[in-house]
Image (tube, rainbow, N blue to C red):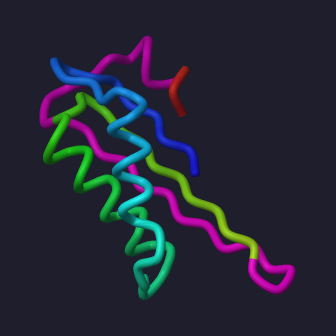
Amino acid sequence: MHIRYVPDRLICDSPRMMFYFNSLDGQDWVGIEDLANLITDDFCNELIPRWISVSLSLHVDGTEHSAHVTDKQPLWDNPRLIPRLE
């Protein structure tokens, strides 16, 4: 799991992040894409980041499955920062 975001006003501290990720453990997911979308939606709803990128990777029986979701606030653009994030 790799999450990168540009905060706006709110950030999440480590204990809350661990609580959040522990709450996801043990749930059944249709696919890794659903989990990536859920994490992105939760971050966007709670922290309202300017930009966020969520990448998940899973190895099953020697095959790698991955999902990548990116979102940003409408009209937010930082041409000097975005290439460094991607």
The residue depicted at 61 percent of the width and 67 percent of the height is 66
- For this orientation, the residue located farthest to the right is 62
Q: Provide residue 22's location: percent of width, then percent of height.
A: 43, 57
Q: Is residue 2 left or right of residue 78?
A: right
- How many discs mark residues in the rendered view? 0
Q: Provide residue 82's location: percent of width, then percent of height.
A: 44, 24
Q: Provide residue 72's location: percent of width, then percent of height.
A: 25, 38
Q: Is residue 24 above or below residue 78?
A: below
Q: Is residue 73 above or below residue 40?
A: above
Q: Is residue 27 left or right of residue 7?
A: right
Identify which residue, 67 or 74, lies in the foreground: 67
The residue depicted at 38 percent of the width and 74 percent of the height is 34
The residue depicted at 54 percent of the width and 33 percent of the height is 86
Q: Provide residue 71's location: percent of width, then percent of height.
A: 30, 46
Is 72 covered by the magenta stretch? yes
Is 86 covered by the magenta stretch? no
The residue depicted at 80 percent of the width and 79 percent of the height is 63
Q: Is residue 43 left or right of residue 32?
A: left
Give, as a single range, the part of the protein colored magenta. 60-83
- For this orientation, the residue located farthest to the top is 80
Splitting the image into 4 quarters, where does residue 52 fall? top left
Splitting the image into 4 quarters, where does residue 43 fall? top left
